[in-house]
Image (spheres, rainbow, N blue to C red):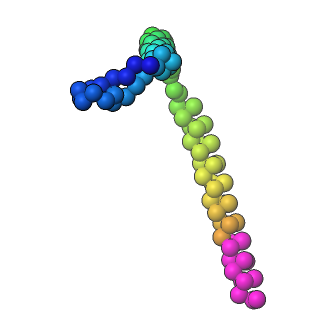
C-alpha cells in the first residue's frame, strides 16, 4: 500500500494499493476501448449511403401519428366522461 503525501506535512493524504491501481487501469482501458469502438461504428455509418425517405413513407408516418393522436383524444374524452360520472356519484352520497 502506497501512502502519498501531497502537502509535505509528513502525514499521508491518501493511500492506494495494487488492486485499486489495477481497477483504475481497467476502467481506463474500458473507456478507451469504448471510445474506439464507437468511433469505428461512426466511421462505418458515415461511409454507408444515405437512406432516401420517400413522400410515401412520410405520408404513412403522418397517418400513423394522426391515428395515435385520434386515439389519445378519444381516450381523453372517455376519461372526462368517467370523471364526470364519478363526480355525480360522489355528490349523491
Q: Is residue 19 left or right of residue 79?
A: left
Prevailing SS of the magenta stretch: helix
Residue with the most extreme left position: 8
The reply to whether residue 31 is visible in this rendering is no
Q: Where is residue 26 in the image (x, y as percent from the top left)?
A: 49, 16
Nearest to the observer: residue 68 or residue 25? 25
Residue 28's quadrant in the figure?
top left
Q: Where is residue 39 in the image (x, y as percent from the top left)?
A: 44, 15
Residue with the most extreme bottom position: 92
Residue with the most extreme front position: 10
Residues shaded magenta: 81-93
Q: Position of residue 71 (x, y in %)?
A: 66, 54
Residue 84's quadrant in the figure?
bottom right
Q: Which residue shows up at 64% across the image and 63% down it?
A: 76
Give the quarter of the figure containing the C terminus: bottom right
Q: Which residue shows up at 54% across the image and 35% down it?
A: 58
The reply to whether residue 3 is visible in this rendering is yes
Q: Is residue 55 left or right of residue 91?
A: left
Q: From what the image shows, is residue 82 above or below residue 50?
A: below
Q: From what the image shows, is residue 47 above or below residue 64?
A: above
Magenta segment includes 88: yes
Nearest to the observer: residue 84 or residue 77? 84
Magenta segment includes 42: no
Q: Position of residue 68 (x, y in %)?
A: 63, 49
Give the total number of marks visible in the rendering.
Answer: 0
Q: Is residue 55 left or right of residue 87?
A: left
Q: Is residue 66 left or right of residue 49?
A: right
Q: Which residue shows up at 72% across the image and 83% down it?
A: 90
Give the quarter of the figure containing the N terminus: top left
Amino acid at each position: 500500500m502506497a501512502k502519498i503525501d501531497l502537502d509535505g506535512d509528513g502525514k499521508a493524504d491518501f493511500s492506494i494499493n495494487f488492486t485499486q491501481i489495477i481497477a483504475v487501469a481497467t476502467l481506463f482501458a474500458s473507456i478507451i476501448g469504448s471510445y474506439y469502438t464507437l468511433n469505428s461504428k461512426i466511421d462505418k455509418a458515415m461511409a454507408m449511403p444515405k437512406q432516401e425517405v420517400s413522400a410515401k413513407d412520410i405520408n404513412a408516418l403522418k397517418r400513423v401519428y394522426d391515428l395515435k393522436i385520434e386515439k389519445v383524444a378519444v381516450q381523453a374524452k372517455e376519461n372526462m366522461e368517467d370523471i364526470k360520472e364519478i363526480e355525480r356519484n360522489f355528490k349523491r352520497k
